[in-house]
Amino acid sequence: MNYLFLHSNFPAQFRHLAAVLAADSANRVIFATARKEGQMKGVCKVVYAQSRKPHKETHHYVKPLEDAVLQGQAVYRVLDKLKADGFMPDIVYGHSGWGSPLFIKDIFPTVRLLCYFEWFYRDRGSDVGFDPAEPVTADDRLRIRIKNAPILSDLYSCDAGLCPTAWQASQFPEEFTKKIKVLHDGIDTNFFSPKQNQPLILPDIKLDLSEAKEIVTYVSRGLEPYRGFPQFMEMVSLLQKRRKKCHMVVVGEDRVAYGKRLPGGKTYKQAMLEKYDYDRERLHFTGRLPYAQYLQVLRASSAHVYLTRPFVLSWSMLEAMSAGCVIVASNTKPVTEVIENGANGILVDFFDVKGIADRVEEALDNPDKMQSIRQNARQTILEKYDLANLLPQHLAWIKDGC
């Protein structure tokens, strides 16, 4: 069979699916992406590029839509060449929201189109308006409505969709929910496995915490308010004053992946380092890490802080649970879909910095008591989010559409 994956990144959520399908010699797997880096065995990668960026004069409500149309157009053009060479997919599976699936039904009218739906934007009840310091304006509400335009087009065009959590699926319009199946991507529990008391030594970045007895960890794609980075950094300043031997390890890029950037080009990391006092000898920013080094950080963690607005659930929280971390997480959806306070993690108020510090300190003070939480966190992932169980369900869902 011929499979076509669409994602501006590579391989992103489709890593395991593409690998398994490509391992079968009866299949041909093509992956259209905007990312030039990276290869996968058996997967033919086709790189597309937008002809231009949205015009500066375009109304700011419409710029995300224009960008999605430009990406969809770029995808159409590379697929048109593949079609001319005789390629006809049986299944197309694309990530919705950024534009890549927009015109699939125009170039392949009879193909079965599957879409990965991560989020539907709402002006109330979830991420927008969550922070009282960021009141929602009329301009925000109008902009958010239009931001859903490419997603709505995909909802209309697709034959079936998939969403990773029930909370995220609940954000989509009721009239489309019959098209959407809730099924998480899955966590590789063989890789993300516990190994306590492993020293944290990362020679590539000259980090040696082999003598550290207390390591608090934080992981996020971007260091930003959506993932509670300002609250975490304020907590770090507070906790460092209380515990003179505690080290903090922050994994992630100094950028904004979601939400608004600061004016003037300053990053949130720069802003927080200027705002509070820190012992920089005990605060370590690793940047983005290869998986093996990232796993070392999780395994060395005494307490792992995960904060998020009511938004898309990060893989990192589930990976940390799979690695047996003590998770101190915000009491927000979709975290509460996974974590039960005191059972497989510890829940805290997103905005209560002192409360976050208190609960982290509780975890540090009671390592023996935390063992059951570590074990239950791991067990939760094994029972509900294990890739070994979920990947066959993904494959069955894809193949049922043939």
Image (cartoon, rainbow, N blue to C red):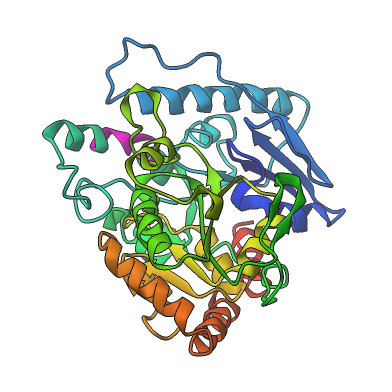
Query: Is residue 3 placed above or below 36 in the rendered structure?
Result: below
Determine whether 302 is above or below 16 in the image: below
When asked about the image quadrant of residue 210, the answer is: bottom right
Q: Position of residue 241 (x, y in %)?
A: 39, 61
Residue name at image x 58 percent, y 66 percent: 319
Q: Is residue 146 magenta?
A: yes
The residue positioned 61% from the left and 45% from the top of the image is 288
Residue 283 x, y percent position in the rendering:
52, 52
Q: Is residue 337 visible?
A: no
Q: Using the image as rendered, state which of residue 49 and residue 301 is in the foreground.
A: 301
Residue lying furthest left:
138
Give the extent of the magenta segment.
145-151
261 to the left or right of 288: left
Q: Give the total of numbered labels.
A: 0
Please, is residue 85 above or below residue 112 in the view? above
In which quadrant is the C terminus drawn? Answer: bottom right
Residue under the image location 53 percent in, 34 percent down? 100
Q: Nearer the viewer, residue 4 or 299?
A: 299
Say whether residue 235 is visible. yes
**Image check: 371 left or right of 195?**
left
Q: Quadrant of residue 39?
A: top right
Q: Residue furthest right?
A: 25
Residue at x 25% of width, y 63% of height: 352
Q: Closer to the camera, 125 or 7?
A: 125
The image quadrant of residue 214 is bottom right
User: Magenta includes 318?
Assistant: no
Image spot of residue 266 (x, y percent): 39, 28
Q: Position of residue 336 (x, y in %)?
A: 36, 72
In-image side of 127 versus 291 (left or right): left
Q: Nearer the viewer, residue 130 or 29?
A: 130
Q: Main secondary structure of the magenta part?
A: helix
